[in-house]
Amino acid sequence: MAKVRKTLQQKKLADLHRHLTFDKEIKIPLSTGHSFVKRQDSSILLYPNVLEDLRKTAIVTFAIIFFQVILFLIFKNHIATVFGLTF
């Protein structure tokens, strides 16, 4: 079986990730030939999907809790019964 090789785009993405991970600074060249260093917040660069993942986790958690409360109220008010389950 042939070895799977990385594409050029995957190599560029890996190189960019290495630079962003190890170099907490980004050099921005100016038109005059000088460059300055701009500090970036490392948490934004390293974890770009954190807010989206937290939002999804919160939605799922609240949906589960809401479902449990609804089931509790249904069983407590004897709207539905399960054999062996008494309140």
Image: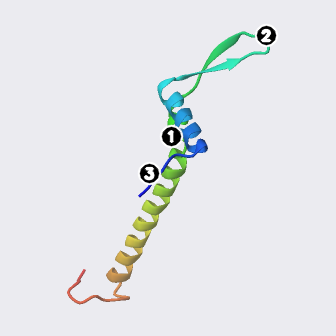
Measure how far apart labels 2 and 1 are at the Cα level: 33 Å
Measure how far apart labels 3 and 1 are at the Cα level: 30 Å
Left or right placement of residue 14 versus residue 3 in this view? right
Q: Which mark is residue 3?
A: 3
Disc 2, SS: loop
Measure how far apart labels 2 and 3 are at the Cα level: 46 Å
Return the x and y of residue 70 as percentages of the image width and height: 41, 75
At label 3, which amino acid type do we have?
Lys
Left or right placement of residue 26 versus residue 21 in this view? right
Which image quarter: residue 12? top right
Disc 3, SS: loop
Q: Which mark is residue 25?
A: none
Q: Are marks 2 and 1 in contact (CB under 8 Å)?
A: no
State whether residue 18 is above or below residue 57.
Answer: above
At label 2, which amino acid type do we have?
Thr
Q: Earlier in the sequence, mark 2 or mark 1?
A: 2
Q: Are marks 3 and 1 in contact (CB under 8 Å)?
A: no
Disc 1, SS: loop
Colour convention: rainbow
Return the x and y of residue 45 as percentages of the image width and height: 55, 34
- Residue tagged 1: 47
Disc 2 crowd, CA 10 A, few/some/many (<14, 14-19, 20+)? few
